[in-house]
Image (tube, rainbow, N blue to C red):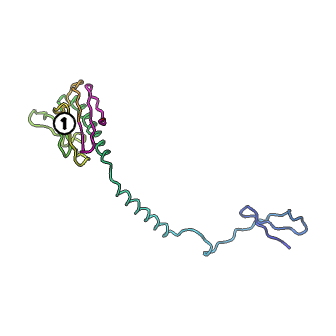
Amino acid sequence: MNLLFVCRSSLHHCIRMPGTRFDQYASVIREPPIMSMDTQRGFTLIELMVVLVIIGTVSATVSMSIKPDPAALLRKDAERLAHMLHIAQVEARVDGRPITLLVDGKGFGFARRAEQGVGYDRFMNDPQLRFRAWETPSIRISVDPAQRVVSGPEWIVAPLRIQLSDGERSLSLQRSSLDQLQVVSPP
């Protein structure tokens, strides 16, 4: 009588050989059984697509409900203003004409005297110094000492501090006499 024992390997089945000891077996390689439709396991393509649509809908809903941090918006406005002031300073040194910062509650931009000496150039077509809107909804700006912010061709400038506030938080943009700009949080 032959006894069938399943070994640990996937394709080997052990058969007890007649006339041998119980612990001696010969290995025989057999073809793996063909799986019928009833025994197959897995997901259909439609089931996978439904799961992907559900995951996409949930992630879109979550990402739409997340609002930007107001403090991060204020910091972004301050850093962008510092970057634009640096660009204005470089442009003023190259061109030799002073550039003035124009600020209101909606945004900021720059202006300088036109090359002909009549009127002002407001950098409407300049991709860097054009008027830009604030990202912070309601922002207040104050300059200390109270003066116009002018970037000129000089290498040594008067230090100043520009305070940006949204009513709850505030940041300062400090310019040193060597025209180094730094965004700092007030103590």
Q: Nearer the viewer, residue 166 or 155?
A: 166
Indicate the quadrant containing the N terminus: top left, top right, bottom left or bottom right.
bottom right
Q: Is residue 94 above or below residue 136?
A: above
Q: Residues within 10 Å of mark 1 (few under 14, many from 20)?
A: some
Give the quadrant of residue 61.
Answer: bottom left
Residue shown at 73%/61% (left/top)? 9
Q: Secondary structure at mark 1?
A: strand
Disc 1 residue type (three-letter): Leu
Residue shown at 17%/34% (left/top)? 100
Give the quadrant of residue 20.
Answer: bottom right
Indicate the quadrant containing the C terminus: top left, top right, bottom left or bottom right.
top left
Count of marks, rendered view? 1
Q: Nearer the viewer, residue 59 or 37?
A: 59
Q: Position of residue 82 (x, y in %)?
A: 27, 36
The single residue placed furthest to the right in the displayed view is 19
Q: Which residues are magenta?
A: 163-186
Q: Position of residue 140 (x, y in %)?
A: 20, 42
Q: Position of residue 113 (x, y in %)?
A: 13, 34
Give the quadrant of residue 149.
Answer: top left
Q: Is residue 184 in the magenta section?
A: yes
Q: Is residue 113 left or right of residue 172?
A: left
Q: Is residue 147 in the magenta section?
A: no
Q: Is residue 168 above or below residue 146?
A: below
Q: Which residue is identified by label 1?
A: 101
